Amino acid sequence: MLERYRQLYKEQFQTFLEYMDKPLKKALRVNTLKTSHVKIGEVLEKKGFSFAPVGDGVGFEINNGPYAISSIPEHLYGHFYIQGVAEMSIAPQLKCEKGDAIWDMCAAPGGKTTHISQLVKNTGMILATDVSSQKLQALRNNVARLGCTNTLIVKADARDINLPLKFDKIMLDAPCTGSGIVRKDPSRKSSRTMEDITFMSSLQKGLLEKAVSSVKHGGKVLYSTCSLEPEENEMVINWAIDSLPVKLLPLDRGAMSPAFTSPFGKKLNDEIALCGRIHPHVADSNGMFMALIKKTGTS
Ligand SMILES: C[S@@+](CC[C@H](N)C(=O)[O-])C[C@H]1O[C@@H](n2cnc3c(N)ncnc32)[C@H](O)[C@@H]1O
């Protein structure tokens, strides 16, 4: 794995390694369905936390404080969701609109579902599916705690869902090896193999194929992972461009870096330049990948 990262990050490899060992600051996303950025700022100040605003008023990064932010009553009331700064930049890329029919295919524990619900002001409908019973419990709790009344939760393998309707927007925050979140979960450093990457890549393609067949003509799918591996990211999207009726749309770049267009010397479709990466050593965050996909056919 280290040799792969040396090839990917080249002269930035050492900096990348240093950042992968640095602990990550906690952050929270304000739930505007229940409160405001200003009010949560006042609460944090009153309770003695040192913090900084992040994401243009989306949330706060916590520098330090007298106790865990999860233990303050406003957390229980659903006034905020504990979420990394990189993670909270993903759902807005789908640009969901009020009244949209949205499917969050791999939804648990609900970081993106609750964010989207908040962005559409609890209107329209979000179908939130996940295959894991255990994680579904957390999804149910978070959706209820944050007051997302537009969300329908179903336990299912997303590949088996067949509905007589097509969605306006689909969020596919795909299952992955999670190599981008070792700063949050250090056990991921040594627990994944090349076989896991190959297995995930095949699952991700199956889910993406389902997403494209379930979205309206002209509708959008946002594909994201917290993996660093090109086989789960750029190469999945490259496969989609070659095999499915899709084209890529530009992302809001913000703190995002360009995707790898020739990972490990393999030249990919030029459109891959439209995908984005959030690098741990550039954004001082977890590592993320995302691609915004438009369906161009009717199938
Ligand atoms: C990266 S996590 C999703 C995180 C979530 N979107 C969030 O923001 O909180 C991937 C999820 O995919 C689920 N999953 C894995 N395979 C699936 C499948 N075939 N269908 C639906 N969900 C699946 C896992 O249980 C896991 O909860």
Image (spheres, grey):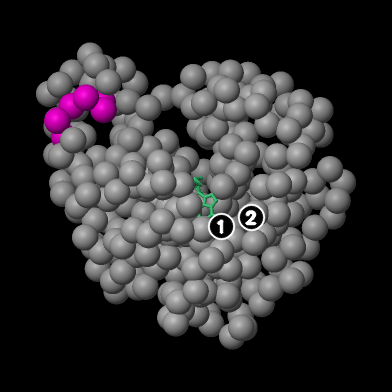
Where is residue 193 shown, x and y percent of the image? 73, 33
Q: Is residue 84 above or below residue 265?
A: above
Magenta span covers which residues? 69-74
Magenta segment's dominant SS is helix
Mark 2, residue position: 204
**Disc 1, SS:** strand
Q: Is residue 180 above or below residue 173?
A: above
Going 79% across and 33% down the picture, which residue do you hit? Answer: 4
Q: Position of residue 281 (x, y in %)?
A: 60, 29
Secondary element at image label 2: helix
Instruction: Specify the amino acid type for callout 1.
Output: Tyr
How many numbered markers are drawn?
2
Q: Viewer-proximal residue, 37 or 121?
A: 121
Q: Residue furthest right?
A: 265
Is residue 91 visible to us here? no
Q: Does 18 lie within the magenta span?
A: no
Q: Quadrant of residue 292?
A: bottom right
Q: Assess disc 2: are there few (<14), some (14-19) or many (≥20) residues with their C-alpha within 10 Å of its C-alpha.
A: many
Could you tell which of marks 1 and 2 lies nearer the N-terminus?
2
**What is the spatial separation of the Cα atoms under label 1 and label 2, in whole angstroms?**
9 Å
Which label sits on residue 223?
A: 1
- The image position of residue 114, as x and y in percent, is 32, 52
